[in-house]
Amino acid sequence: MQIAHQIVILLLIGYIVYTVDLKKKFFPVPVVLVIIGIVLSFIPYFSSLHISKEVIFNMFLPGILFTSAYAFPLKQLKQNIGMMAALSTVGLIISFILLGIGIYAVSGFFSASLSWAGAFVVAAILAPTDPVSITAIIKQSGGSEKIADVVEGESLINDGTSIVLFTVFLTMLVTGKDFSAGHFFSDFFLVTVKGLGIGLLLGWLLSWMIYYTSNKSYRVMVTIAAAYGGFYISEFVGGSGVLTTVAVGILLSQEFDKIPEKTELKRDLDGFWDIVKPSLLSVLFLWIGMEGANYLLSAHWGLAAAAFVLSLVVRLIMVGGLIGGVPAWRREFDRPGSAIALISWSGIKGSMSVALLLWLEADASGESEMLVPLAFIAVFLSLLVQSIGIYPLTRLLNKK
């Protein structure tokens, strides 16, 4: 019963923060919630409240991903699918490799020499992006709407890639096995195919069921079943639950253009999911602050700060190389340099990074016990610095 009371209090705090956000256009909601969570961790009443990898994966991620996917403009998806797919797959793998090498190289300067597997596990945690409210700030501060769409679309897809990378190198870290490129790419292919296949099937079934029922309650119910059920089924058979849920949401978005009463349908779904998403995000980020407060006392701040800076540099190199290196993509932006800078800076770390971090914590032993506080501090710095810096950076680049 106490846990229920604690969650209600967290929801109330989150709603207050989001209410302030409606009044202040450039209010960095995630970092404010995390900081409040850190403060709450010192209150004994909340000492019994803990979050786990299973809670984030099974309760938070499906709802957050589904809402973002079905609300994503289909027109923007079709226009930018090539760029978003490249950034979230090839681009993420490039970032992961460069970041892993960088973290391994600099770790020796901080008296905390990491193994190759340990460095790449941290890189996998820092690889996925989760812009949350960043995209809204970009649009409201005069930044390009296209930039915001590319950042948001990339984040929908790259979570699946990061999970595969993480599981491969966590297994290496725990068991001491060597890396096998063939094993990695076969796992990546199978996880992707299964996830997308189940997502396409469930998305088609969901679209059919919504088309043939006009009851708004039933329509909302089947979206819940598809979003969460699809995630669980895919994970059970070894697929990517992330890709399944995203595929279901995108197919539903496509269905809006086919249904005559699409405005009414979207209003019905928004009436439910627009409440669910901020509720999940409120509790999640408050919980992140509470769970990670103890790690902020770690002695690895120097290496964590270096890892964070490296993540920014590596992402800038990756985004610049992909967008700047493809003339067709470069020409889509009026000012390619500003676009590359904003897309790079908007690669904030969030819910998926924390889920992987808690996964590491659950299996922590030996070297991995040091990696947990190291990775959390780097994620915290990303939330703090990038969330606060996005508005002034957007304004500065617009002036130039």
Image (cartoon, rainbow, N blue to C red):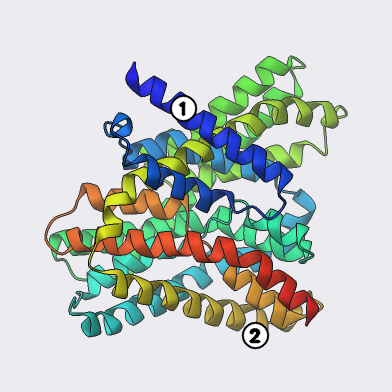
- Mark 1 or 2, which is nearer the eye? 1
Q: Which residue is mark 2?
A: 325
The secondary element bearing badge 1 is classed as helix
Amino acid type for the residue under numbered disc 1:
Ile
Query: Which residue is at 52% across, 43% downward?
Result: 244
Quadrant where the C terminus sits is: bottom right
Query: Which quadrant holds residue 235?
Result: top left
Q: CA separation, marks 1 and 2?
A: 49 Å
Query: Which residue is at 58% across, 72% downward?
Result: 344
Outermost residue on the left side: it is 366
Query: Which quadrant holds residue 206?
Result: top right
- For disc 1, the neighbor class at 10 Å (few under 14, some 14 to 19, many from 20) is few
Q: Check the image and report above or below for 316 versus 367.
A: below
Q: What label sits on residue 9 in the rendered view?
A: 1
Relative to residue 328, is residue 56 drawn left or right? left
Query: Which quadrant holds residue 187?
Result: bottom left
Query: Which residue is at 68% across, 15% downward?
Result: 217
- For disc 2, the neighbor class at 10 Å (few under 14, some 14 to 19, many from 20) is few
Relative to residue 302, is residue 74 drawn left or right? right
Q: Check the image and report above or below for 191 versus 88.
A: above
Closer to the camera in the image, 138 or 316: 138
- Residue 341 visible within the image: yes
Outermost residue on the right side: it is 260
Query: Which residue is at 19% across, 74% downward?
Result: 115
Quadrant where the N terminus sits is: top left
Q: Who comes first in sequence, dot 1 or dot 2?
A: 1
Coordinates of residue 131 in the picture (x, y in percent): 58, 56
Closer to the camera in the image, 335 or 172: 335
Amino acid type for the residue under numbered disc 2:
Gly
The secondary element bearing badge 2 is classed as helix
